[in-house]
Amino acid sequence: MEGYLPRLSERGRRWARFVGLLAGLVVLVWVARALRPVLTPLVAALALAYVLNPPVTWLERRRGIRRATSVSVGLAVVVLTGATLLLAGTAQIVQLAGNAAAYTQQALGWLGETFPGLLPGRAAPATAAAGADGKLPPAVAVPDVRDRLVALAAEHGGALVAYVARFVSDVFYWLSLTVLLPLYTFVFLLKFNDIVQTVRAHLPARYRPAIVRITTTIDGAIATFFRGRLLVCLLVGVLTGVGWLIVGVPYNLALGALAGALNLVPFLSVLALPPALLLTYLRATQAGENWVLAMSLVLVVYLAVQAVESFLLTPAIEARASGLHPLTTVVALLIGGQLAGLLGMLLAIPVTSTLKSLASEYLLPEIRRLARADEIPVACQPGAPPAATENADAAAAPRQPGCVPPQSQR
């Protein structure tokens, strides 16, 4: 880079590199935001390939299984399992939405019976009462369905067309994502190690050791999250859903998926427990079963899964700490989702881990050096002119007040 810059001092070259790097990051963020629909499946596929590459490489090197075979079989199993769970969970969510009104009425009835006077009075019966003259009020004409649709289209035609167009666009986007994601993942997994070696071979030789060291640190932090925390969340979701299925919790797969997603932050999966207890109570009361026993089984399953996670899954899978506090993880995901949607959420943890590693490598040592320099007297700092002395011996070893050799400090 120095060959393309005018003659500058070392300080000027540092500032030029910093400004150039900052401008490149701004352009990169702008391009990523503009190309979100195109980049989202690519980034998601690269993340999946990053997660699945270690077992594929192990099968290739230790078991002699061809990489193409293991990738094909592994992706087929992952896609079929994920599609089955997704369809089953979606069906349960749709069923829950259909029964929401009945559950609401049942809950309101229980509240009205348990706490009289808590809820406002019920509405009057729908049957029309006769007036003072003994005549019924005139019937209100119900408009024809076709007339209502015509009026609705005339009043909100533009907004309706925009909504339909946006809905079709979203459906097409998710369908394309469903098709392209396995394809991209297959290609990345097949050539993942070759891509890593190619990138490493084309790094500048002068900075290659530093770049490899920093990249290794970043890889350790990111791998812990993607290969560790996400795998733990997946297993917690599956175990919770299957356990609640065994004890008869309604909508068990959807609630298990909710528990797994919330477990991204440790112990936040407890927020999935109240809905499971409430739905179990409503089902048990409708069926005339012992609701205390049913709710106790739900709680036992949750506590058992949490014990398995704390004592088996987390120590075995998350052997290394990611260095990111759970609160930092949540804030990073929220910021990424706000800035770039799904693409931002996919990039939030890698970017945060990268910034933390770079700050630990370059920024914090400089801050510590400046802090120590402020504590050392000016005459003791490196490069300070020697004190005036009368002979050469005194000039060779000047004694100045407040100066203590570093090796003698306690």
Image (spheres, helix red, strand yellow):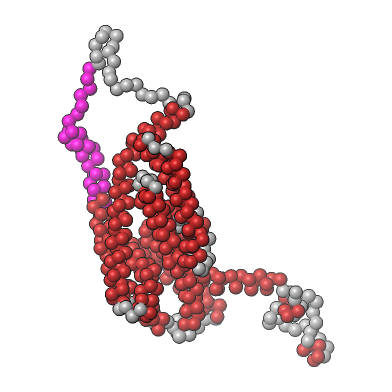
Q: How many marks?
A: 0
Which residue corresponds to the image point at 38% horizontal and 24% vertical from the top-left?
A: 122
* Magenta part, dominant SS: helix
Q: Residue 79 location, x and y as percent?
A: 29, 63
In the picture provided, is 117 more to the left or to the right than 30? right
Which span is picked out in magenta?
138-166
Above or below, 308 relative to 207:
above
Quadrant in which the N terminus appears = bottom left
Quarter location, residue 30: bottom left
Which residue corresponds to the image point at 45% horizontal and 69% vertical from the top-left?
A: 223
Quarter location, residue 46: bottom left
Above or below, 317 relative to 385:
above
Q: Is residue 402 visible?
A: yes
Quadrant in which the C terminus appears = bottom right
Which residue corresponds to the image point at 73% horizontal and 80% vertical from the top-left?
A: 407
Q: Nearer the viewer, residue 24 or 236?
A: 236
Q: Is residue 162 magenta?
A: yes
Q: Nearer the viewer, residue 221 or 110?
A: 110
Q: Is residue 266 visible?
A: no
